[in-house]
Image (cartoon, rainbow, N blue to C red):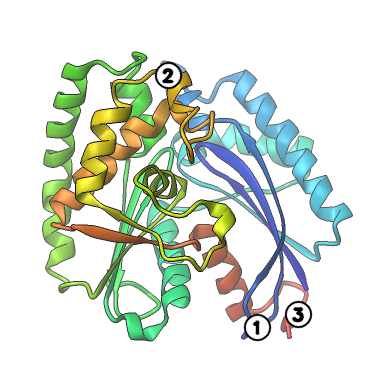
Amino acid sequence: MRLGVLDVGSNTVHLLMVDAHRGGHPTPMSSTKAALRLAEQMDKNGDLTKKCADSLVTTVAEFSGIAQSSGCEELMAFATSAVRDAKNSEAVLARVKEEAGVALEVLPGVEEARLTFLAVRRWYGWSAGRILNLDIGGGSLEISTGIDEDPDAAMSLPLGAGRLTRDWLPEDPPDRRRIAVLRDWLDAELSDVAKQITETGRPDLVVATSKTFRSLARLTGAAPSSAGPRVKRTLTEAGLRQIIAFISRMTASDRAELEGVSSDRAPQIVAGALVAEAAMRALRIDTVDICPWALREGLILRKLDTGFGNGETGE
């Protein structure tokens, strides 16, 4: 059956459509994105602005129409950190349901981490042993680890690239002193978390998901997306440090010219790199493998495991 996932993230609204059946590899059919950067569109009261909500309603309605015209039998629509944390989230969700006809499910941060971990586990298989996964979004950082499909530990922290850009690095290019202060602050924020994660056991494989990590890996020489999802891509701590020294001196427009950095991600890639660096330092990680599957694929896999709303098995 054809299944759609509508992901209202902190940076983009993303519609992924796949042909899927239980026990099989979900086959991507199309991918449509709109960069709304919700994590950067909060007013001083912590509300999503009216302009931002208007854009969200319009985009969700448009993408829902695309899913219907493309033959999607079921559309899973969800929102993550930016909508979850907005003070006026209930009002925004009500508008989306009334005007766009789509009921968005707000995923808790820990559930994001668990679903992403499921996707990573399925991608690498049981032979990978204990996996530690890192995922940087626009509003939050998710960390999960375990030896099964359900992680032993899953955490969500308000350390997303968009959020930290808005709160810490508003200058373009970023202020050098504020970068240094942010580094120290991130170390303090991750200290206790790192202890909890390491207590679960030493990982056999360390993995990173999300566009932020893919962009950083590309900047350090990893294969482009055109090479396909099965090409091995890695990001090293040493390479990350070199990239931070380089991109933190550039303006957002100059960063947007770099291979692997889109114009909508360019303003927040420095903050994302600093979060990645701090997480790897706190967890004593030298290298991460970049996994092409993440939250959207986790939702699809969970849906295939549990069956469909209309009673079909998906087989």
Pick the front one: 214 or 102? 214
Horizontal placement of 182 versus 170: left or right?
A: left
Q: Please name the amino acid that badge 1 sits on.
A: Arg
Q: Gap in Å between the C-alphas at discs 3 and 1?
A: 13 Å
The image position of residue 89, as x and y in percent, is 54, 35
The image position of residue 242, as x and y in percent, is 23, 38
Q: Please name the amino acid that badge 3 sits on.
A: Gly
- Which residue in the protein does label 3 denote? 311
**Is residue 86 something that shows in the picture?**
yes
Number of dots carrying numbers = 3
Q: Compare marks 3 and 1 and give the one earlier in the sequence.
A: 1
Q: Gap in Å between the C-alphas at discs 2 and 1?
A: 45 Å
Q: Quadrant of residue 46?
A: top left
Q: Quadrant of residue 36?
A: top right
Q: Gap in Å between the C-alphas at discs 2 and 3?
A: 44 Å
**Is residue 274 something that shows in the picture?**
no
Q: Please name the amino acid that badge 2 sits on.
A: Asn
Q: Quadrant of residue 55?
A: top right
- Which residue in the protein does label 1 denote? 22
The N terminus sits in image quarter:
bottom right
- The residue at 42%/65% (across/down) is 232
Please say if the residues under marks 2 and 3 sit with CB atoms less than 8 Å apart. Answer: no
- The residue at 66%/32% (across/down) is 56
The C terminus sits in image quarter:
bottom right
The image position of residue 229, as x and y in percent, is 53, 63
Task: Tell me, for residue 45, which label it has, or none.
Answer: 2
- The residue at 60%/49% (across/down) is 7
Q: Residues within 10 Å of mark 2 (few under 14, many from 20)?
A: few
